[in-house]
Amino acid sequence: MGEKYKAIKVTDRVYWVGAVDWGVRDFHGYMTQRGSTYNAYLILADKVTLIDTVKKPFMNEMLERIASLTEPKNIEYIISNHSEPDHSGCLPETIDVLKPEKVFASTIGTQTLLQEFHSGHEIIPVKDGESLSLGNLNVTFFETKMLHWPDSMVTYMPDDKLLFSQDAFGMHLATSERFADEIDWSIVEYEGEKYFANIIMPLSSVVLRTLGKISDLGIEIDIIAPDHGPIWRKDVEKIINLYTKWATQKPTNKAVIVYDTMWCSTEKMAKVIAEGLIDGGVSTKIMSLKSNHRSDVITEILSAGAILVGSPTINSNMFPSVADLLYYLKGLRPQNKIGGVFGSYGWSGEAVAHIKEILTAMKVDLIGDGLRFKYMPNDNDLTQCFNYGKLIAEELKKRLD
Ligand code: FEO
């Protein structure tokens, strides 16, 4: 093993020993255009403890970073906060190589790891609120069920007021810097919001409950060390406030118009509806699905008060790209949105009705009946588009404080 991959100091006894994945661009349907990191941490306590591991192909990078600090076989405990394979993929091999004295996970985590690896490795279940002595210091486990898997838990180290938060407060962002305060804030905020929108949004109520629990327990946090992206040390309050804001999903004076188009008729409608919204004083973003990935559209939708979806009809259905977006969005369960639907068609024109059905199932409050025009919209049709935008702007204003 060489000495090229180094551990990065987080506190006097906690080090980052993870891996940077500069090239990953797809995370089960989420476009990670800035790559990602798989963060693992080493606590140099009496019982040397590894918090989480990394995605399987990055195991040697992790082991080499550990070796830059201590002989990896000195690790006596491994704590698995989350059993998704980007954090546990190399756990069985790591156990085989390091032969730690004990490996811990949440009660559900022990079952999940068993079902993933079908191996005979013994994993010890820990309970919500249970503390574990590492000799000269303790850590405490808190279950965060469904944030974002049933097995998820976080590990708190009171001595350093450090929370190992697994996926929570993370983001897909590959950088040479390990701390959020070393990176351009606009990038950190955008990628944090994108991660929240695409992964955490359906669990917004769990986020608010968990933040409430942390506050009730009076847990002081100076550092948040997540499993992806940068570590929070100077901006802990800022990221917690952002999580509260994102999870609340309070509508803002913003509309997102997302559409696809066949011969530019639906696009013409989108642009004039936008003019109506803008004339009505609403900040408006037009996103063609020909040029925007679903995960970027979702990021914009998180903070929007209004979503307008447009599609031509093709073979009695909406465009496949629009169906893709809506099914993805439905699973993410956005809240507190008003909506609009539009599209052009040639003869049967089912797309608008199909979109309305899906948005209604998502509890989006649809304004008006939507607009659909045959072939190319004429000037009168486009006037209706403008007025539709104005109507949605007026309805949105009524719903803002
Ligand atoms: Fe980063 Fe849920 O794994």
Image (spheres, helix red, strand yellow):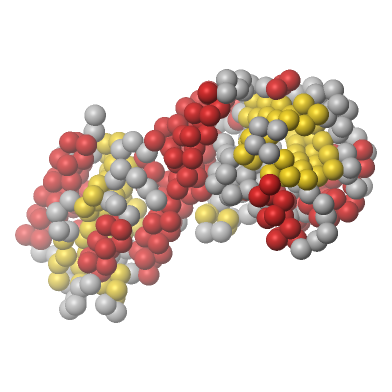
| Image quadrant in which you'd find residue 371 | bottom left
Q: Nearer the viewer, residue 190 or 110?
A: 110
Please tell me in which quadrant of the rendered image residue 259 appears.
bottom left
Image quadrant holding the C terminus, namely top left
**Image position, residue 4 (x, y; %):** 85, 41
State whether residue 164 appears in this view.
no
Q: Residue at x 56, y 27 (%)?
A: 214
- In the image, residue 171 above or below residue 363: above
Query: Between 209 and 64, which is closer to the camera in this rendering?
Result: 209
Q: Which residue does the image show at 52% across and 34% down from the upper left?
A: 210
Q: Is residue 139 left or right of residue 32?
A: right
Residue lying at 51% horizontally and 48% vertically, measured from the top left: 199
Residue 300, percent from left and from top: 39, 45
Residue 398 location in percent, x, y?
A: 17, 36
Q: Is residue 37 left or right of residue 146?
A: right
In this orientation, does residue 133 appear?
yes
* Percent position of residue 184, x then y: 55, 31
Q: Is residue 216 above or below residue 55?
A: above
Residue 254 vertical position relative to residue 372 in the rendered view, above or below:
above
Q: Is residue 57 left or right of residue 330?
A: right
Q: Is residue 302 above or below residue 314?
A: above
User: How many numbered badges does the structure rendering display?
Assistant: 0
Q: Residue at x 48, y 34 (%)?
A: 209
> Which residue is at the front of the view, 152 or 265?
152
